[in-house]
Amino acid sequence: MADANVSFVRHESIPPSPPPARERGAIKWMRENLFSNWFNSILTVVALYIIVRLIWGGAPWFLNGVWDAGSIKECRDILTEAGKSTGACFAVLVDRWDHLLFGFKYPADAYWRPVVAFVLLLISAAPALFYMYIPRRMLILTALYPFVAYWLIWGGSLWVPICVALSIVATGLIFRFVESMDISLRRILSALVGIAAGLGLAYLLFKGAGELVFIAQSIGTSGLNIVAYALFWAAGIFTYVFFIPMGIFVAYTIYQSAEDGDLVTLVTALLAIYLMLFYALGPVSGALNGIIPLELPAVPSRDMGGFMLCLILGTVCVSLSIPLGIVLALGRQSKMPLIKGICVVFIEFVRGVPLITLLFVANVMLAYFMPPQTNFDLILRVIIMITMFSSAYIAEVIRGGLAALPKGQYEAADSLGLNYTQATRLIILPQALKISIPGIVNVAVGLFKDTTLVSVISMFDVVGMIRGPIQQSTDWISIYWEVYGFAALCFFIVCYGISQYSQWLERQLRTDHR
């Protein structure tokens, strides 16, 4: 007979029971995020009411949209015949999509060129943006992209960007060669380079003094112009008096830098690239193009417009303003009074002037400061001004990142025996830039949207196209929501992509285990 006192022993665990319905799925998410308390519940209900009203009011306008018409009058006639009281006229996007994207002067048979340049931008930017997943040797694509994009968009001879790229490579080799020179040879080179730089600076100051006096004479002394007249005259006289002493001072300073080699190396590289770009580029590229013609039909800068122009200005200016902003931030933190003073004056002056003022200066006044017969491309002038403007703001953002670092980081770099360059490159800047990512992205997004201000100086970007050739045409007069909505959508896609990338990069660089 079996023993009735033997207890039951389970050898397998009981399967877990599902959580209550209130603690899983969409119900849990809504309880935690939308209805966590009475106040959040009221806000959720109000927000849902507003969203429903907007959708209810805007859906008929969107769903009744007309996509096939030749003018706004035809759109309204089609809506009237269909018995619809409201509806969008999306036919303007079908009719003028090329103008909105490329401008109304860019050759239609060359639309493939900016499209290919945009695709190559996405490909070449990947090694720099996702460097932790892509081999470093792929950065050569990022380095070559500006030269290829310039040739595709502006056209002309391919040998011009090739020669510019080779000049930059040659400058880097010259920099390395001078850096590794024997001290005796470097002393001789510093004397020669110092004399050349001193004479060049003295000549530029002399010509600049003449320009200042010419501007003062052009202003005259009538009315309130007397203040500007006096300032330009004072600046011209000061430059006339000190152009020779300044040249001698620069030449002596470069000669004295032969021991450490930093200054003479930098000035030698700058002189080398100046000579190659301004004196050798034209003859060499012309000779090579005569032997092996590689060229596309040239497109003037005035023929560029639409959203393409905004992308060009945004991409170029952001790419240039970040390194320039880093240099300005480090210069403002410098212990050298002259360097710090120049950076402080530049940053505070540019930040105190509206961007639209700088654009007017680029369009009208910048030519007065150039030598006679100088042909300075308008897009290049605008790029210079926008880059100056954004670099000043980025410099302040990076300076905040530098100030946020504890003093122990600088002391740790000193204890390791690192010099200023090594400590800045290896320890200080990586941490400061990581802190500054949100601020830099904020400036970049604002800069990209501010590129539409070029419409006030008669450059037909996407907003300029809407306000000018589209709305002033008889076919599409008084059309607003459709075209401005299209422009807003284009800007939103780009800015939202930048924002999402910055958040992803912050998560990747988060090493403090928060």
Image (cartoon, helix red, strand yellow):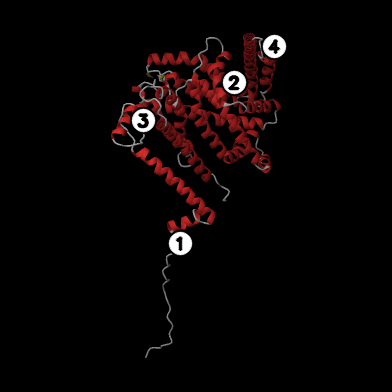
Q: Amino acid at mark 3?
A: Leu
Using the image, tell me which numbered label, if any, was put on residue 22. Answer: 1
SS assignment at label 4: helix
Q: Where in the figure is residue 164, as x and y percent of width and height?
A: 48, 21
Query: Closer to the N terminus: mark 3 or mark 4?
Result: 3
Tell me the distance, in whole angstroms, between the alpha carbons under discs 3 and 4: 58 Å
SS assignment at label 2: helix
Q: Amino acid at mark 2?
A: Thr
User: In terms of depth relative to the viewer, which is nearer, 127 or 114?
Assistant: 114
Query: Closer to the N terminus: mark 1 or mark 2?
Result: 1
Which residue is the site of mark 3? 93
Density class for disc 4 (Cα within 10 Å; few <14, some 14-19, many ≥20) is some
Tell me the distance, in whole angstroms, between the alpha carbons under discs 2 and 3: 54 Å
Q: Amino acid at mark 1?
A: Arg
Tell me the distance, in whole angstroms, between the alpha carbons under discs 1 and 2: 72 Å
Q: Amino acid at mark 4?
A: Ile
SS assignment at label 3: helix
Q: Where in the figure is residue 135, as x and y percent of width and height?
A: 46, 39
User: In terms of depth relative to the viewer, which is nearer, 168 or 392?
Assistant: 392
Which residue is the site of mark 2? 268
SS assignment at label 1: helix
Q: Are marks 1 and 4 in contact (CB under 8 Å)?
A: no
Q: Are marks 1 and 3 in contact (CB under 8 Å)?
A: no
Query: Closer to the N terminus: mark 1 or mark 4?
Result: 1
Query: Closer to the N terminus: mark 2 or mark 3?
Result: 3
- Furthest toward the left, the residue is 81
- Do we see residue 293 in this rendering? yes
Query: Closer to the N terminus: mark 1 or mark 3?
Result: 1
Of badges 1 and 4, the one in the foreground is: 1
Which residue: 68% across, 39% down? 414
Q: Is residue 431 above or below residue 219?
A: below
Tell me the distance, in whole angstroms, between the alpha carbons under discs 1 and 3: 48 Å
